[in-house]
Image (cartoon, rainbow, N blue to C red):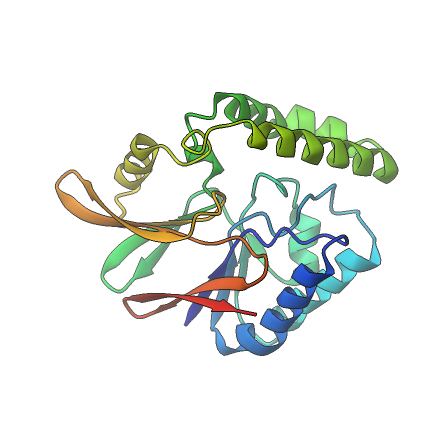
Amino acid sequence: MIHIISDLHLCEERPDLTALFTQYMNDIAPKSDALYVLGDLFESWIGDDDDSEFVKSIIAKFKAYSDSGKPLYFQHGNRDFLLGDEFAKATGGVIVREVHPVTIGDKEAILMHGDSLCWDDKEYMQFRQMVRSQEWQQQLLSQPLAVRRGIAADLRQKSREAQANKASAITDVHPDAVKEVLQKHNADILIHGHTHRPDFHDIEVDGNHCQRIVLSDWGDKGHYLTIAGDEIDSHYFE
């Protein structure tokens, strides 16, 4: 059984989210055969050299999972796009590409964080292009940890303000973006996070019945998907 989680937004300021994560990793994740984390595991990630006790505790829980012999996969989100090889090595996981294929029964599926599908959010898409550039990332990572923490806090505040002033439709995925990525990868199912709008959507692409499945962010409850054979189920816990 595969487990998929997304948008935990873990940070030291939210011990309630850390408690949910701990419960999940201790009691629920061990029942899975593989675990995918589809981005925004952290509220922000300032680099793999972050040596805080909080980060060490999160890494340790993932390492315990991978040490049990189970595959562990991470995708970059819009909050933690700086997750790198050192983080993957420390957890015993693998960082996969922005579009990651999996087979569900007799159907082809793709896993994504989902932010690249929000075509109508022009301001964010421009920002995304900037921060995903190697030059920008190298420049940021060259700064001391303390400076990076301040930059991350500033970016989070600006993001909250920007989101508050945008219409709901602008911050959702664009239907044409969904169809395009399904067509490009010959997939029947798209599973993503990012929008914090959990649901199962039936859509038609080139006359074929397809699905778009959206994970929830974590808050009062945790959320995960399970894939067993050709069955995809949604689960909440608290």
Residue at 59%, 54% in the rendered image: 8
Foreground: 197 or 96?
197
How far across and down, in percent of the image, does residue 23 sit? 63, 72
- The answer to whether residue 21 is above or below residue 202 is below
Give the quarter of the image for residue 144: top right
Residue 96 position in % (x across, y down): 51, 49
Which is more toward the observer, 224 or 70?
Answer: 224
**How far across and how far down the image is residue 87, in percent?**
69, 53
- Quarter residue 102 falls in: bottom left
Q: How many marks?
A: 0
Q: Is residue 128 left or right of residue 212?
A: right
Image position, residue 28 (x, y; %): 54, 75
Residue shown at the point (52%, 54%) measured from the top left: 6
Q: Residue at x 12, y 41 (%)?
A: 207
Residue 87 lies, with reference to residue 120, above or below; the image says: below
* Quarter of the picture holding the N terminus: bottom left
The reply, left or right, for residue 226 in relation to residue 82 is left
Tell whether 238 sits left or right of 47: left
Residue shown at the point (57%, 70%) measured from the top left: 238
Quarter where residue 204 is shown: top left
